[in-house]
Image (spheres, rainbow, N blue to C red):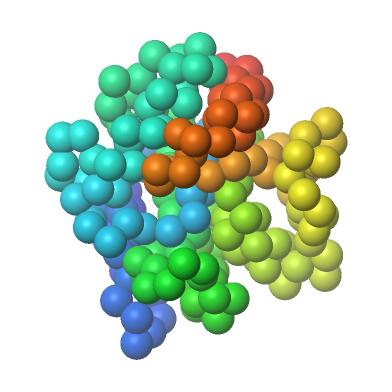
Amino acid sequence: MKLNMREALTKFEDPFSLEMRLPDITLDTEKIRAIMINEVVPNNPADDFYGANTPPDYLTTTLPLFEKAGFRADSIDDIIAAGIYITNAVKVPKTDTTISRELIEKCVPVLEHEIGLFPNLKVIMLMGDVAKKAFNMITKAKTKKNAVPSISTYKLRNSELFYEDKRVFPSYIMTGGNILIEKSKVEMAAEDIQKMLTIIN
């Protein structure tokens, strides 16, 4: 089913006082088999994954992660064609160095609806702690427990986690300048993407 994500999510969105930035991309929801949830939208909408900049800032770190995982992607279109959708857990730019629990909670209903738009999902990738917190808020409300244990991500790397029938990968943030500094996290995120690609192909 072809859907414009912004239109689909705007219809669902409650009349929040927040002005949320939603992904303006049209895709076939039935062909998406994996969703990657990044932490937060950028300050400049043109730098988001589907933004107008050439390239958007968020892709300058994301595309190399895919290449390191053994998948050559030159644009977001290549990623979508592989059955992968990328979004942000928090739909409002951050104004501080940290993202408050309250802000995550306000964005969770939209994220939950967004995940539910893809009937053939096999993998949910949580790229960073904010994405992990947001997803746990969704799962705890439904099942009374967190899908991802509240321990360090590296300690979970050898665990096979599932939510319903979907494999869940708690991984590392995929955007921002710091990712280039933390080489070990880059390696681990690329390994997680490689595992995700194996599952959906």
Instruction: Give the image location of residue 8, x and y in percent.
Output: 34, 60
- In the rendered image, the quadrant that contains the C terminus is top right
Is residue 86 visible in the rendered image? The answer is yes
Location of residue 12 by image quarter:
bottom left
Instruction: Give the image location of residue 177, x and y in percent.
Output: 40, 43
Instruction: Give the image location of residue 65, x and y in percent.
Output: 47, 26
Is residue 117 visible in the rendered image? The answer is no
Give me the residue at 67% from left, 68% from top. Answer: 137
Give me the residue at 37% from left, 73% from top. Answer: 95
Give me the residue at 39% from left, 68% from top. Answer: 94
39 vs 65: above or below:
below
Closest to the observer: 194 or 44?
Answer: 44
Apparent side of residue 37 relative to residue 61 in the rendered image (left or right) = right
Give me the residue at 29% from left, 49% from top. Answer: 48
Apparent side of residue 114 relative to residue 188 in the rendered image (left or right) = left
Q: How many marks?
A: 0
80 vs 131: above or below:
above
Apparent side of residue 198 relative to residue 33 in the rendered image (left or right) = right
